[in-house]
Amino acid sequence: MGELIRRFSGFNYSAQGGLQRDGKRIHLGPQARQLLEMLLESSGTLVTKSEIAARLWPGRAVSDDSIDRCAYLLRKPLREAGGEELIATAYGRGLSLRASVEIVDEVAAQPLRFAPSTEPHILDLWQTAYELAGDRTRDGFARAQEAIASAAQLDSNNPSVWSLAADIAAGRAVRGFLRPAEAAAMIEDFAGRALGVAPDHTPARAVLGWARGALRGRISEGLGFLDEAVADDPLYGKARVYRSWLFAAAGRLEEALVDCEEGLINSPHDQALLSLRSWFILCAGDLERARRYARDGLDLRPDAATLHLVMSIAYSLQGFHEEAVSAARRAVSWSPDDPFQLTVLAYALARASRYEEAEALIARLAEDAKLYAPPCFLAAAFFALGKRAEALEAIRRGIADGCPWSSFVRLDPRFVPLRSAIDGMGRTQQADEVRPSG
């Protein structure tokens, strides 16, 4: 008796022959392959998230983001090979296969043989980098960059390696661990390398679109890239994250929220989408709803520190100052050196009339030359301290630097009294360049 082959929805899978359709082998990374094996073995019954974590990451604490990413890395090649939507998600519980499975003997089937590929090892490094970047700390990002550099040395022609390197640079810029100009240059380089190998590579187009819009102020151009990325792969959650960011930057807040909601249908635990949805609701001025969505998001993702920040800002604006400080401190506890989070804590402290603590925190951020505290978030703290001129100067600097958070400076409810002054600052052409919605 030969090796067993599992047939489902036009595909063949075996441990030695891998995944095939119409005699062609379809490459899967090592964890996507293990996930497929679990789904095939389950015969259509639910495979729980705890079972997936135990098999794919034995003995390790695993986030829902990692499981969602692994499911995406399996869904995409199946769909591209004509498999449509074969993997069903039971939100919060697990995954199942939408296909009947037939088991046959390989002696009768005679599958094609292929030489072993080195790419799974590269994808292991890729997954490691993704997980390290996921903790959103300075050390996590640094180790992620090391992992992805190792992957690039092994295979410089792998577009997925380069697009992830670009995503890591974007994440560092958002948190304040990388200056905007440096991040923009890195993303252009890394995404350009990916697109040089695979011109239609969706992740590379998505991150490049975000960088062009959020870091370089070319929103229309950036949205063009992102519209193509979403059209090419509507299930790719990060494209929704990046596009919703630029929608909001262009003043198209309703479309930004719709994009978040669409992304959360397929990736309900994605912390970037959960966080941006609450942030956009806050920017729309609905403070109570923003807090409620942030609380609901934290039920799904207790590690989503940005949701604590949204709650903190909403509490501050509603006059619940001690609650605001507590929420900001909970966020900071996840990453004590995160300049983005520390600026929100400084704002909460200033609003709570704890001026000396706020001033000390701002001074601490200024002393660390390796950090780039988002100037518009520093501006909120300055304004809460009664320093209007310093606040406006910080906003001007953020816009000039290309700080990604400056995308929202005209929407941020903390700046309502400053909006007439902000409207006279640069980069107002961004929204004018974008085609009208509808």
Image (cartoon, rainbow, N blue to C red):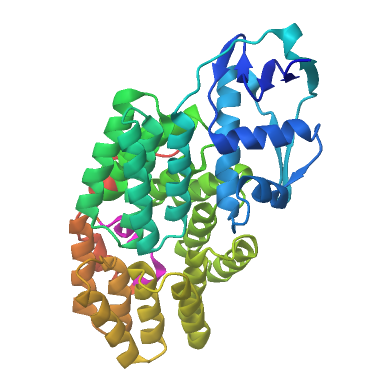
Q: Is residue 52 above or below residue 415?
A: above
The image quarter containing residue 335 is bottom left
Residue 404 among those drawn in magenta: yes
Q: Position of residue 178 (x, y in %)?
A: 26, 57
Residue at horizontal 79 percent and vertical 20 percent from the top: 103
Residue at horizontal 64 percent and vertical 24 percent from the top: 84
Identify the residue at the far front of this view: 1
Q: Is residue 63 above or below residue 90?
A: below
Q: Position of residue 124 (x, y in %)?
A: 48, 40
Question: Which of the two residues, 23 or 258, is positioned nearer the viewer here?
Answer: 23
Q: Position of residue 378 (x, y in %)?
A: 29, 73
Residue at horizontal 47 percent and vertical 65 percent from the top: 306
Image position of 169 (left or right of 83): left
Can the viewer see residue 185? yes
Q: Position of residue 8 (x, y in %)?
A: 73, 20
Q: Which secondary structure class fits the magenta region best?
A: helix
Can the viewer see residue 209? no
Q: What is the tally of numbered marks visible in this picture?
A: 0
Question: Which of the two residues, 209 or 55, is positioned nearer the viewer here?
Answer: 55
Residue at horizontal 34 percent and vertical 34 percent from the top: 154
Q: Which residues are magenta?
A: 403-415
Question: Which of the two residues, 156 or 296, is positioned nearer the viewer here?
Answer: 156
Residue 254 among those drawn in magenta: no
Q: Is residue 223 above or below residue 135?
A: above
Question: Which of the two residues, 366 or 70, is positioned nearer the viewer here?
Answer: 70
Image position of 247 (left or right of 315): left
Image position of 106 (left or right of 314): right
For the N terminus, the image quarter is top right
